[in-house]
Image (spheres, rainbow, N blue to C red):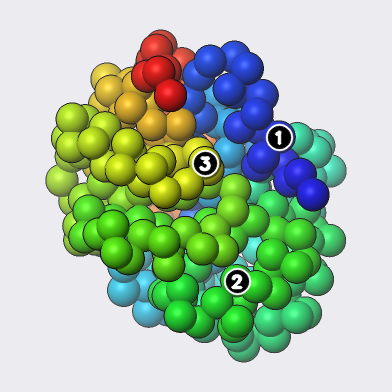
Amino acid sequence: MTTRIDARFAELAKQGRSAFVTFLMAGDPDPKTSLDIIKALPKAGADIIEIGMPFTDPMADGPSIQAAGLRALKGGMTLRKTLEMVRGFRKEDDATPLVLMGYYNPIYIYGVDKFLTDAKAAGVDGLIIVDLPPEEDDELCIPALKAGLNFIRLATPTTDDKRLPAVLANTSGFVYYVSITGITGAAAADSKAVGDAVARIKRHTKLPVCVGFGIRTPQAARAIAEKANGAVVGTALVDALRDSLDIQGQATSKTVAAVADLVASLAQGVRGAKQAAE
């Protein structure tokens, strides 16, 4: 079965370019503004959209994304409302792939089977669950694949050749390579090291490899997109959103445009990249 993610990568391969993948937290700074921003992303140049599921204990996230999650929770965001947001997006856009990213706990509380049914019906295409190792594939990964959702795994600089096959065993959609060890939004990625890492992962899989962490400028996005099948930007977008809020942390008339404008400039960086020969 071909998902929207598979279809999008096939289409981009024909165009000879990398994907631009954006990440924002669902419900940040409030449910309505969050949906307005996500609706604006495809036109601004996002090829795939990752949506964070707010969680009270996000241990792998840096300060910016943690703060976004807290703003969303304070604004009343829940997993149920996140799925409603996906449904709202799908009313106008049936092509752009949507990936939910976050932690297992909210899904476990929601109920795995119910969550997978509701996520698929809402129009979710894939999941990235950062705290479920391959050893626990029966919890969510295998059921998600059976439900027709891609299950996207993270690989890091510390994922060695011995560990990679386990990480990749039930992965689908794409592999998300975290170019820096540590929390999100920390240092900048080194494109030569990224190129070597992507080549190493590709020896183990035919899936596209997207690279995230440390991309903040069009130049950095371009450098990564030249080495990988996609560049993922999250923290820079979350920071642009935060900087547009008023003193109470509420959305302003500038909020949607602040994110969309940055996406447009980063997308130009990605689109200016010449794809490295496979």
Tell me: residue 167, above or below residue 6: below
Query: Which residue shows up at 26% across the image and 32% down it?
Result: 195
Query: Which residue shows up at 73% across the image and 46% down it?
Result: 3
Pointer 1 residue: 7
CA–CA distance in space, label 3 to label 1: 15 Å
Report the front residue among 21 and 228.
228
The location of residue 25, given as percent across then percent down, is 49, 56
Pointer 2 residue: 141
| Dot 3 amino acid type | Lys
Pointer 3 residue: 206
Quarter occupied by the C terminus: top left
Locate residue 194 relative to residue 9 in the image: left or right: left
| Dot 2 amino acid type | Cys
Badge 2 element? helix
Tell me: residue 42, above or below residue 132: above
Report the front residue among 88 and 3.
3
Locate residue 277 relative to residue 61 in the image: left or right: right
Report the front residue among 230 and 257.
230
Q: Nearer the viewer, mark 3 or mark 2?
A: 3
| Dot 1 amino acid type | Ala
Crowding at mark 2 (Cα within 10 Å: few <14, some 14-19, many 20+):
many
**Residue 254, disc:** none
**Disc 1 vs disc 2: Cβ atoms closer than 8 Å?**
no
Query: Which residue shows up at 59% across the image and 83% down it?
Result: 139
Whether residue 26 is visible to the viewer of this picture, yes or no, is: no
Badge 1 element? helix
The location of residue 152, given as percent across then percent down, is 53, 56
